[in-house]
Every structure is written in C-alpha cells, then in structure tokens.
Amino acid sequence: MDYDYLVVGSGLFGSTFAYEAARRGKRVKMIERRNHIGGNIYTENIEGVNVHKYGAHIFHTSNKKIWDYVNQFAEFNRYTNSPIANYKDEIYNLPFNMNTFNKLWGVVTPQEAKAKIEQQKIDAKIGEPKNLEEQAISLIGTDIYKKLIKGYTEKQWGRKATELPAFIIKRLPVRFTYDNNYFNDKYQGIPVGGYTQIVEKMLSSEMINVELGVDFFDKKEEYLKQFPKIVYTGMIDQFFDYKYGTLEYRSLKFETTVHDQENYQGNAVVNYTDADTPYTRIIEHKHFEFGHQSKTVITKEYPKTWHKGDEPYYPMNDKKNNEMFSKYRKLADQTPSVIFGGRLGMYKYYDMHQVIGAALSVVDKEFS
C-alpha cells in the first residue's frame, strides 16, 4: 500500500491525527515501540479493574469542542478528582482549600485563612519569587509549603525546591471555599471501561495500519525516504541524534499489586508529601469508576532519575533545557516533511485535552 503518512507513536496526539487523516481519505501507517496502543493513557483490565498502567489520567477541560470530540469515542462518568495528602499519617484535602486550612490551623472563614497566609508571607520576607520554594511560600505560606509541597516536590523532581523554577508551582490551585475538586474545568470524568477503547476506536479505520513493537530508529533513514510525510511523537532530541545535547526528563517506576480486599485506601489518589516515604502517591484504580469488585489494585509511583533508555515522563523545563529545546525546534521548523507533536515532540507538559487540541490544530493546518 502507498501511504500518505507515517505516524510514529500511538498516543493521543498520533492517534488523533491518524483518525482525522483517515477521515479525509488518507492512508496511514502507524508504528509503535511498545507492545500496545494508547501511549501513556493505556489501561489494562486486572481483576475486573481498569488499571492506568502509566499513572493516573483524569480527563478535564473547559473546552466544549474538545469535550464533545472525546465523548464520541467513549462514555464518561462523573468522576471528580479529589486527591488527599498524607503527611506522616496526617490527612489533608487537596487542592489547598478551606478544608485544608481548617485542619491545619483551625480557621473557619476565608478571611481567617487569608490573614494566616498573609502573615506567613510577610514573616518569610520574600520579594519577587526566584525559585519554586519562594513562589510556593508567596502563594500559600510556610506551613503548607513545609508539610504538603516541599517533600513531595523534591521527590518528584529530584532537586531541591530552591533549585527548581518558580513556574512549576503556579498551576497549583488554591481556593478559599470548602471545595475538594482539584480542577477548575467545566467538564471532567473518566471513560467508563478505561482509556484504551478511545484509541482503539480512533485507529479502527481500514485506512490505518498499526504495527506494534517497531522502533522508528531501527530504520529511520528508510522511513524518511519511503514516506512523503511523517508525524513524529517521540523525543525531539533523539530524532536529531542529540546534536545539541540530551534534553532532561524525570522518569517513574510503577509498582502495581492486587489486594484481596474491597477497599485499600478509600480514595483514588493519595499523595505522600513527606520526604521519607519513597513514593509520591498511591493510586487505587477502582475508585476512578466507582468499582465494587471483591479485590482491589493499587499502584505506587516512585520518581526516578531519567537515563537514556528509560521512559521519559516529565520534561525538565528549566532555563538550560528550554534553551536547548529552542535549537531543536528550529531544526524541526527546517524539516517540513516531519510534523513534531505530543509531550516529547514539543518538550512540553500537556494534559490530555491539550494534546487533542494541539493535534486538531495540526490537522486544520495540514488539511486546510
């Protein structure tokens, strides 16, 4: 078959592009390095529970177009992301809200909470925040920073909070209501039956041929000659043979176990915010879909230093890496036969709705 596109990677970006290309009569060959489709949103059924194999994924967006788009592939439930924090067996609500402030300080009104935070900010004597620690204290005060941010963040990124850029913490919600909903988005939920079905439906067209267990770099030059256009969702620095150096990431190790009990921790997501606990969080997957199975499946997430060959999960978007990426971005702009996309292709942290939105923008540009 003569293909119009080679799509490298079967995550949300590549699969959305392949689906839209096939709808327009284009022939697509997709190759995937792993032995399954779906990228990091892949879910596997274990003991009747849909297990998020690469970390918790909660779909959320305020964009009705994106919400309607993804709902054509699955029915979504009413799951609301309400994680809790465990600090040395003290339990606090996340995101930081009046329930958190009441548990920590005994305050009852928003005015009392704001006054407490403001006094701590004044005592800390922070001007323009220069790093994550200063940014966090300027947002939420020293008590919450020390108990619920510092240990978790330093485990997650493998660096001192004073060495991390301030912007990382700016996306953290803080609200002065008794509301445990982590996201501010209008639409939120989990697909009933897991995420894998979404990608399966995206790739079900006879115009799309998927091959698993295929590494693009085994035949990179051959692919470049063979296909008129390539959609590449892998690491951008690897595509260009690390010409300007190796971009940094954080990786994860997942430890998944089955427990012969109905309920392990009472919540889908529990963050462990002290420095001594080696994992950052425990996921109990059945709670994403309000399950009543007789057994339960949990996953502990351990952050780890990324080395070549490890799975890259989180781009380290500090000044040094962003400057290096900008050089790779220029090379990408000079390579018109290749479309770079997704978290690795754009070296950027994307939520799922943002990945779909970015893919649809590329589709509009490609087929306009």
Image (tube, rainbow, N blue to C red):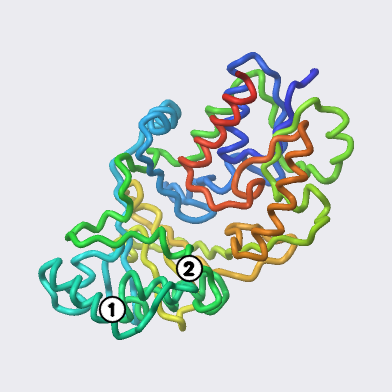
**Can residue 19 be seen in the rendering of this structure?**
no
Give the labeled residue for mark 2.
166
Q: Which residue type does callout 1 highlight?
A: Glu
Q: Which mark is residue 90?
A: 1
Q: Position of residue 157 (x, y in %)?
A: 55, 70
In-front residue for pair 143/283: 143
Q: Position of residue 132 (x, y in %)?
A: 47, 72
Q: How many neighbours does mark 2 have within 10 angstroms: few (below 14), some (14-19), or many (20 or more)? A: some
Q: How many neighbours does mark 1 have within 10 angstroms: few (below 14), some (14-19), or many (20 or more)? A: few
In-front residue for pair 151/360: 360
- Residue depicted at 38% across the width and 38% down the height: 192
- Residue depicted at 30% across the width and 78% down the height: 121
Please indicate whether residue 251 sits to the left or right of residue 99 in the image.
right
Q: CA distance from mark 1 to mark 2?
A: 27 Å
Q: Position of residue 340 (x, y in %)?
A: 68, 40
Q: Quadrant of residue 141?
A: bottom left
**Residue at disc 1, secondary structure:** strand
Q: Quadrant of residue 25?
A: top right
Q: Which residue type does callout 2 highlight?
A: Ala
